[in-house]
Amino acid sequence: MPRFEAAIFDLDGTLVDNMRFHARAWLDISDRLGWGKPLEYFLRETAGLKNAEILRILAGELPAEELEAIAHQKEQRYREIYRPHLAPIAGLMPLLEDLMRRGTRRAVASAAPRENRALVLEGLNLHRFFESVVGAEDAPRGKPHPDIFLAAARALSVEPSRCLAFEDAVNGVLSARAAGMEVVALTTAADPEALKQAGARWIVADYLSLPEEVVSGL
């Protein structure tokens, strides 16, 4: 069992169980604009991608200002429907407190827009636990490319191989593995077998069910 110097957490679906609210917001936009995509598509295919990447897939080469407007509408809708349900995934707070006591380095690596990160990190007072928050603005490419996890490792001054990533999406697992990190995957949004096939070493329902070897390795 490797010993890890840092823990790097995705945000959506990993700190909070909110992916179905993102999917519902995208579905609202899809229905309004006639894209014809089902809810399952947004749960399965778009997790970890930047809004610009999702919109290029769905809308093609629209003018930049139009794409930005659509993305803004989607995120406003997401925050509207998720805010009343804001809560950490079970066991997250005790884990973060334990990591902080141990001196394990801690970062967030998320393609979520700043306003969405603030909703979770400020709304749940999670900022105190993280030394760095790395966003889409810090990485040229979204997941499954490794850019954002590599940027988080650099921000903590820890070699990627000494970082343990926490993720919930297939694209996120692929991203962390491409960065050279072992991965704990939560089953908040993706099929456990798909997460395993993507390269996750451990698959859990929440932080209460983390294997002892993971806890002791941090």
Image (tube, helix red, strand yellow):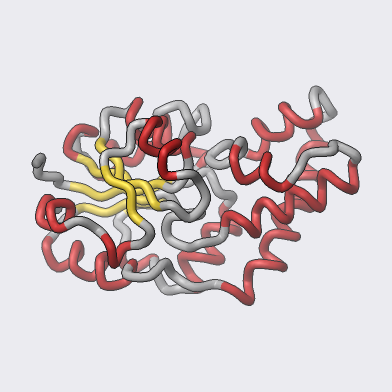
Farthest-out residue, top? 61
Looking at the picture, tell me which residue is in the foreground, 83 or 68. Answer: 83
Looking at the picture, tell me which residue is in the foreground, 131 or 79. Answer: 79
At horizontal 39% and vertical 52% (from top left) the residue drawn is 186
Q: Hey, which quadrant is residue 215 in on the image?
A: bottom left
Q: Is residue 101 above or below residue 72?
A: below
In-image side of 84 versus 207 (left or right) = right
Residue 159, x across and y down, in percent: 19, 34
Mark count: 0
In-image side of 69 versus 135 (left or right) = right
In-image side of 22 versus 15 (left or right) = right
At horizontal 53% and vertical 40% (from top left) the residue drawn is 48
Residue 133, x across and y down, in percent: 40, 51
At horizontal 42% and vertical 67% (from top left) the residue drawn is 89
Camera sees residue 134: no
Farthest-out residue, front? 193
Q: Is residue 154 above or below residue 82?
A: above
Camera sees residue 14: yes
At horizontal 48% and vertical 44% (from top left) the residue drawn is 191
Farthest-out residue, bottom? 84
Residue 156, x across and y down, in percent: 25, 44
Residue 93, x across and y down, in percent: 32, 71
In-image side of 195 versus 7 (left or right) = right
The N terminus sits in image quarter: top left
Q: Is residue 204 above or below residue 48?
A: below
